Amino acid sequence: MTERKPADMSFTSWIDKQITEATERGAFDNLPGAGKPIPHHGDEDAAQAWLRGYLRREGLSADALLPAPLRLRKAIDRLAGEVAGLRSEQEVREAAGELNHQIREWRRIPLGPPIFVPLVDEEAMVRLWRATQPEQAAPASPTAVRPAGGAAAEPARGRSRWWRRSGAGRSGARKPG
């Protein structure tokens, strides 16, 4: 189809001529599906049927068709469900970090509708992972110190965002409560 249609020829006859020449060259021989009936999908939309067939042939998930922010939100939900199957806290942090990197990349130049995508809270994912892991009988390290009651020491909590913004945290004053 690289040649132009002659001015004195109609489109129908020009296309018929090209089809005839291609048939004589054998361009339509041994095509996939040759001699097979065209699949009938009933009353469903032909475009939807083609799209489903394409996804199946290419081995793609329907998530590949979603806009980036929705795909990222689904990935956040999926990570929360898959965190229990990860082997270590480091893997949890790496998975959350990679997802946060993807979210930041999308935020840098968003395409499509402005849908907010929150970053993954690494600490919350680690807490979720720890909650799904079986309790260990002995402390993880021999240097771990337990208070007199036998319970593990509670990790120090960081300052909240409003505290950092206020500038009061720089003077060494402690946060009340």
Image (cartoon, grey):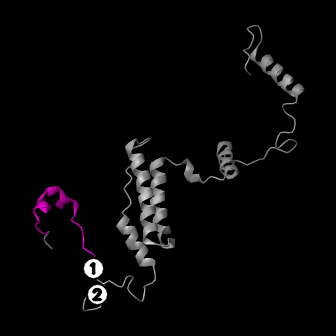
The location of residue 117, given as percent across then percent down, is 39, 53
Identify which residue is drawn at 47% across, 48% down.
68
* Residue at the spot 45% in from the left edge and 60% down from the top edge: 76
Write down the region rendered in magenta: 154-174
Q: Position of residue 123 (x, y in %)?
A: 35, 67
Residue type marked 2:
Arg
SS state under label 1:
loop
Residue 20, given in percent of the width and then of the height, sits at 86, 23
Give how far across and how far down residue 31 sits, in percent.
Answer: 83, 39
Q: Is residue 166 magenta?
A: yes
Q: Is residue 23 left or right of residue 120?
A: right
Which of 43 and 173 lies nearest the eye of the viewer? 173
Instruction: In the rendered view, tell whether residue 109 sits above or below residue 11.
Output: below
Relative to residue 75, is residue 51 drawn left or right? right
Q: Nearer the viewer, mark 2 or mark 1?
A: 2
Screen quadrant of the N terminus: top right
Could you tell which of marks 2 and 1 lies nearer the N-terminus?
Answer: 2
Marks 2 and 1 in Cβ contact (< 8 Å)? no
- Residue at 55% from the left image edge and 53% from the top image edge: 63
The residue identified by callout 2 is 146
Mark 2 crowd level (few <14, some 14–19, many ≥20, 10 Å Cα): few
- Observer-nearest of 172 and 121: 172
- Residue position marked by numbered label 1 in the rendering: 154
Relative placement, left or right, of 20 versus 118 is right
| Residue at x-position 72% and y-position 20% | 2
Count neighbours of disc 1 (C-alpha within 10 A) and say few if under 14, some if 14 to 19, many if 20 or more.
few
| Amino acid type shown at disc 1 | Glu
Q: Say if the magenta span includes residue 6.
A: no
